[in-house]
């Protein structure tokens, strides 16, 4: 059995994801698709719509064979660390390839771009530093520096202003830097614009568009057209139990009291918080009673919205710079859900694994990365502010990997 | 104008408090009664029923002339520090006397008890230490040691198993240790038993009994018989705005998420947490979704219920051993409410005050004790989990001392 890896958040799983999954099977001709998936907090620095167990079940029901958890420290990291953690795990799971969706669609372009930027690394970094000095955000500085460097090239290069191209570039880079044998593949995304509204296309909408519909208070059935039925059922079941979906608007009262209970000094120790952002965050929390107005006050040219949200995620989980600096690579493989094929594949590679395979967290409860996953999960359930959420604390200890079919 | 001080929590102000206030005027024959009152968290280690502003207004409406805030660090401390902070402030306010309610009722008994225990200090402390080694709680050890020492005495001594006698003893002790000129007085309490149910007497019930009625979901009018009308109106107004009263049951979801966001190591740094209680608290928070069952799990022979509640209060406000050790005596006088007489008295002593008189907190915002008061107030409002509570953050900056009549 040969396996291909994909890197996902599935927030929630929709028809675009299904397309990516199907194209991945066609492109790689592999038996097994393994998804490494973020837990309850995501790379854009926000709580997931529904928890990791629910999202992993949706994925299996729509054809993924095995879902493993990307540990919190990587799932909520900037693109390069996010990519490093994910590719490392897929490599550890003996995947022969991984396949990512991109606006670009041609792997050659990614490889040529990686080759160019590796060759001109110093020049690139100097240019980035100069742009950052001018007070613009890191992604914008990357983009400007990249434009400067790529001007003279005649190669086909990737447009690094597109979000999925950026992630893809980091996957290709991670695969190279990790010296892994895993082979990158890419397929073109159907939804070109990451922030599309959900009604632009009849059956495919971005996850952002779908979430927007859900948060605007539409009935769940309104998003019916955009997702396979197991996803829709999963969302319905979730809402009947929790009465709401995970979002910063929902979590803000809890985030706010964490900020106000803390001090500026303690906030400055939280991962990703730099350049006095602790003061802006502290001050805004004092006066703003909802997330939107809070963010409007602290947003800045220097930091992207998602970068600020990652700071807030780390405040929420009390994840510090010290803890972040202590982490290099994932230390375990933790399956969340699988089908029989995924289970058979895991069995077949089990004896060759270099990392512990965690099916019961109690047996590995001293692993620092795992403790973070458990804590993030517990705090996620409490942020939902429902009585069922209160009872979900410690569920990581009680939930075995789910085997479907 | 001569002033007498009283030390109060008024949680809420009831007919027993009114009696104490009236008897204090008669006994001391002074013009002014000044109450030093706890803020939003109380000496028994729990959130107040209603906030400090509301409680101070109730007090003025029922005849107190001036209410000043006992800073958080003293208001939530064990009896000796609570008493030290309160007596120090009343002395700083030039009170010629203070008058406390006690089960005992005779000041001579307090003085003779203080004299006995000062003389036999070493013997007393050795006996306490020996009893504590046997694993009983501190108050019980005090009591046993006291019984041993007082056996041979023929003086009239105070029964130190009664809660108001204990506090009274600490007031007398504080007045002595602070070398103040303030003269103690005591009057006998009408309600002898601190934990009486509210229906034992037609017009006087303990605050505990009244709170019990309120939390049992009785209409506020049920407690009508036990309190002056301004108190009743104050409670009604409060409930119409916040839809609930402050209590650990109400605050528990917030306390719980603070515990789960923390770590055992960080909990051990919280004030009053000793002897591995961080482990018990952490473990209980993992599984218990309501306060009563949480407390049932962590209660221990070694610590009284109130001592454990003080630990929880300090977790709630993130008040650490380091902060506690840094505090000796109150650093300011902060009026909450007053009538014209109280205002005139304050004017008359203003130029002789040794401590800053705070009417606007912004002007003194670097005072560490004051920062604690502000933080405790903000976190109290958020613990109420009402949208109005969300808007009360920062109210210490917006609220000037209230002048009634």
Image (cartoon, coloured by chain):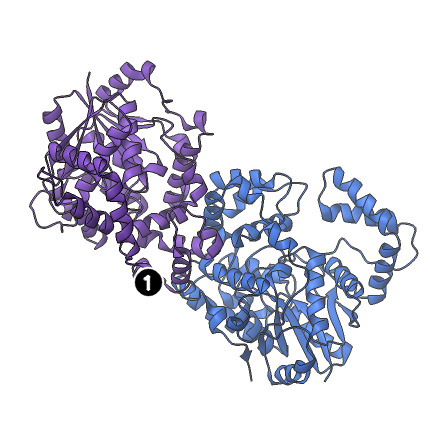
Chain colours: A blue, B purple
Q: Position of residue B186 (x, y in %)?
A: 14, 32
Q: Is residue B299 above or below residue A359?
A: above
Q: In percent of the image, x 38 and y 60: which residue is there?
A: B280
Label 1 belongs to which residue?
Answer: B297
Q: Quadrant of residue A224?
A: bottom right
Residue A205 versus residue A349: which sits nearer the camera? A349
Residue A125 versus residue A194: which sits nearer the camera? A125
Mark yes or no: residue A232 visible.
Answer: no
Q: Position of residue A107 (x, y in %)?
A: 82, 67
Instruction: Say which quadrant the C terminus of chain A sits in.
Output: bottom right
Instruction: Say which quadrant the N terminus of chain A sits in.
Output: bottom right
Q: Is residue B275 above or below residue A136?
A: below
Mark yes or no: residue B184 visible.
Answer: yes
Q: Quadrant of residue A104?
A: bottom right
Q: In percent of the image, x 77 and y 60: which residue is there?
A: A169
Q: Is residue A180 above or below residue A261?
A: below
Q: Quadrant of residue B231?
A: top left
Q: In percent of the image, x 22 and y 51: which residue is there?
A: B140
Q: Is residue A132 left or right of residue A333?
A: right
Q: Is residue B189 left or right of residue B241?
A: left
Q: Position of residue A228 (x, y in %)?
A: 59, 74
Mark 1 crowd level (few <14, some 14–19, many ≥20, 10 Å Cα):
some
Q: Secondary structure at mark 1?
A: helix
Q: Position of residue B170 (x, y in %)?
A: 23, 37
Residue A44 versus residue B75: which sits nearer the camera? B75
Q: Is residue B57 above or below residue A293?
A: above
Q: Is residue B382 left or right of residue B149?
A: right
Q: Is residue A401 left or right of residue A162?
A: left
Q: Chain of mark 1?
A: B
């Amino acid at each position: 059995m040969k396996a291909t890896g994909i890197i996902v958040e599935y927030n929630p799983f929709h028809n675009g994801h299904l397309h990516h999954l199907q194209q991945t099977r066609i492109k790689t001709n592999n038996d097994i698709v393994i998804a490494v998936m973020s837990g309850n907090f995501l790379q854009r620095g926000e709580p997931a719509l529904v928890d990791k167990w629910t999202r992993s079940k949706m994925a299996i029901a729509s054809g993924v064979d095995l879902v493993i958890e990307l540990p919190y420290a990587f799932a909520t990291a900037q693109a390069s660390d996010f990519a490093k953690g994910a590719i490392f795990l897929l490599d550890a799971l003996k995947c022969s390839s991984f396949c990512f969706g991109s606006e670009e669609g041609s792997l050659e372009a990614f490889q040529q771009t990686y080759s160019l930027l590796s060759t001109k690394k110093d020049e690139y970094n100097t240019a980035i530093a100069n742009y950052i000095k001018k007070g613009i955000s890191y992604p914008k500085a990357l983009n400007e520096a990249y434009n400067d460097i790529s001007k003279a090239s005649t190669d086909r290069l990737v447009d690094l202003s597109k979000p999925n191209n950026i992630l893809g570039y980091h996957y290709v880079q991670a695969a190279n830097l990790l010296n892994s044998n895993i082979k990158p593949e890419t397929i073109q995304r159907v939804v070109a614009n990451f922030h599309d509204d959900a009604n632009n296309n009849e059956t495919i909408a971005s996850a952002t568009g779908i979430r927007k519909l859900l948060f605007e208070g539409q009935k769940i059935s309104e998003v019916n057209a955009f997702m396979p039925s197991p996803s829709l059922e999963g969302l319905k079941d979730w809402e009947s139990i929790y009465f709401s979906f995970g979002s910063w608007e929902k979590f803000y009262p809890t985030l706010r009291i964490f900020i106000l209970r803390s001090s500026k000094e303690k906030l400055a120790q939280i991962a990703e918080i730099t350049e006095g952002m602790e003061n802006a965050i502290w001050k805004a929390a004092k006066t703003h009673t909802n997330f939107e107005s809070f963010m409007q006050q602290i947003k800045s040219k220097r930091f992207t919205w998602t970068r600020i949200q990652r700071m807030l995620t780390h405040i929420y989980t009390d994840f510090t710079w010290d803890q972040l600096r202590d982490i290099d690579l994932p230390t375990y493989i933790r399956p969340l859900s699988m089908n029989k094929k995924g289970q058979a594949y895991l069995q077949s590679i089990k004896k060759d694994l270099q990392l512990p395979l965690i099916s019961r967290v109690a047996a590995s409860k001293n692993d620092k990365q795992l403790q973070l996953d458990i804590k993030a999960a517990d705090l996620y359930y409490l942020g939902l502010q429902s009585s069922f959420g209160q009872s979900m604390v410690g569920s990581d200890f009680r939930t075995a990997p789910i085997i479907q079919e």
